Structure formats: structure tokens, C-alpha cells
Amino acid sequence: MNNRTLYLVAGAAPPVRRIDVPIQAAQKAGWDVCLILTPYAYRWAIEDMEGEIDRLQRLTRHPVRHQYKLPSEEDVLPAPDAILVAPLTSNSLNKWAAGISDTLALGLITEGIGLGLPIVALPHWNAAQGKHPAVARSVETLRSAGVTVLLGEGGFVPHHPRQGDVDAYPWQAAIDALPG
């Protein structure tokens, strides 16, 4: 069994449909992977891919989380040693940089900065979304907080609207950027 725990926090962008790729790559690299989905990513998995959550739970050997637990409930996941946020949407990027924690996914990554956890973020948005002035500010805010944001050469390069290639999403670059 792997002795390092990775929280994989995934947003509702097309690469989430290939979330088994980074799970298996991280497991091969020695990580025990726990999957946390944003509410919309969870909805995609539930509504569009029957049985997907059960399959992902078998793959990770952990419950797939998508919402805050009640205060009376026990934590069902081990504490993370690192966090990978991928795919990171521009919406989640901007909320995260602003310190907004209105979902479990955002709460974990916002807290992760304060805990000093190693955090790698692999964005996914189109070039038009990336031109919004808030995106560059948010990327800089997170980088200055110690988050490794893999945007540009060697990471994710935004594509033209409606011309993305989910199979070209650089999952391995994110796995390689995790602490050894």
C-alpha cells in the first residue's frame, strides 16, 4: 500500500472524463489517491456516465467526495500529503485565488495553502476565457502563495474555443510536478 496520500481535486472541464488516467499514474508513482470532485464534476459523473462513481471508488479504494460532511460525521479520507488540482477551471481558479470556499473542493485547496501542502494545479480553459484579466491575476496570486500552476509551455496551453483535445491534456506533467 502507498504511504503518501494525494488529494486529486477535479473540476467540471472535459478532461475530467479521463480522470482514471491521473489516478492510475499517481498510484504507479506511489501515491494513495483520494478523489474530490466539484459539484458540477460530480453531476457530470452521475448524470452522464452511469456507474462512474462506483468505478472510481473501486479504483481509488476511497469514497469519492463532492460535498462537505456534517460536523457529526467522521472524516472518511486520510489527510493529504499533497494536492493535485486538475482539471482546474477558470471559475474555480478565480474563486480559489479570492479565498472562496463555498464547495468542499475549494475549501480543501484554500486550506491546503494555509497548511503549507505542496499543491500542483493543471488548468483547463480555452484561450478566450484565459484572456479575461482576472485569470492572469489569479494565476499570479496562487503562484505567489506557493502553488505550482502548470500554465503555458510544459503544462496546459489554452486552445481555441470548442477546439480542445481531451486526450492531449498533459496529465503526466502534473504527476511529474508532484513532490518525489
Image (cartoon, rainbow, N blue to C red):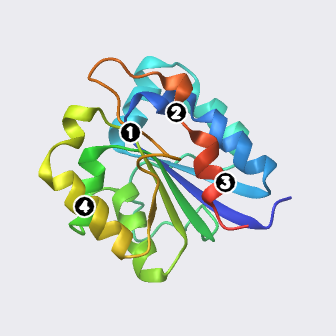
Between the residue at mark 2 and the residue at mark 4, the CA separation in whole angstroms equals 21 Å
Q: Is residue 3 left or right of residue 103?
A: right
Element under label 4?
helix
Name the residue located 61 percent from the left edge and 53 percent from the top edge.
34
Q: Nearer the viewer, residue 99 or 133?
A: 133
User: Circle 4 is placed at which residue position?
Assistant: 138
In percent of the image, x 73 and y 40: which residue is there?
24
Labels 2 and 4 touching (C-beta < 8 A): no
Callout 1 crowding tier (Cα within 10 Å): few <14, some 14–19, many ≥20: many
- In the structure shown, which secondary structural element does the residue marked by tag 1 occupy? loop
- Amino acid type at mark 4: Ser
Lower position in the chain sequence, tag 2 or tag 1: 1
Disc 2 vs disc 1: Cβ atoms closer than 8 Å?
yes
Q: Classify mark 2: residues with Cα within 10 Å, few (<14), some (14-19) or many (20+).
A: many
Q: Say the numbered circle drawn on residue 176.
A: 3
Image position, residue 130 (x, y; %): 24, 42
User: CA separation, marks 2 and 1?
Assistant: 8 Å
Tell me which amino acid carries mark 1.
His
Q: Which mark is residue 169?
A: 2
Placement of 89 over or under 148, stated as above or below: above
Q: Residue at x 35, y 75 (%)?
A: 144
* Earlier residue among tags 4 and 1: 1
Q: Can you name the residue that lies furthest to the left here?
A: 133
The residue positioned farthest toward the bottom in the image shown: 115
Residue 81 x/y as whole percent: 63, 71
Disc 3 marks a residue whose amino acid type is Asp
The quarter of the displayed image where residue 19 is located: top right
Which labelled disc corresponds to residue 124?
1
Which corner quadrant holds the C terminus?
A: bottom right
Inspect this view and state whether residue 61 appears.
Answer: no
Spatial CA distance of label 2 from label 3 is 14 Å
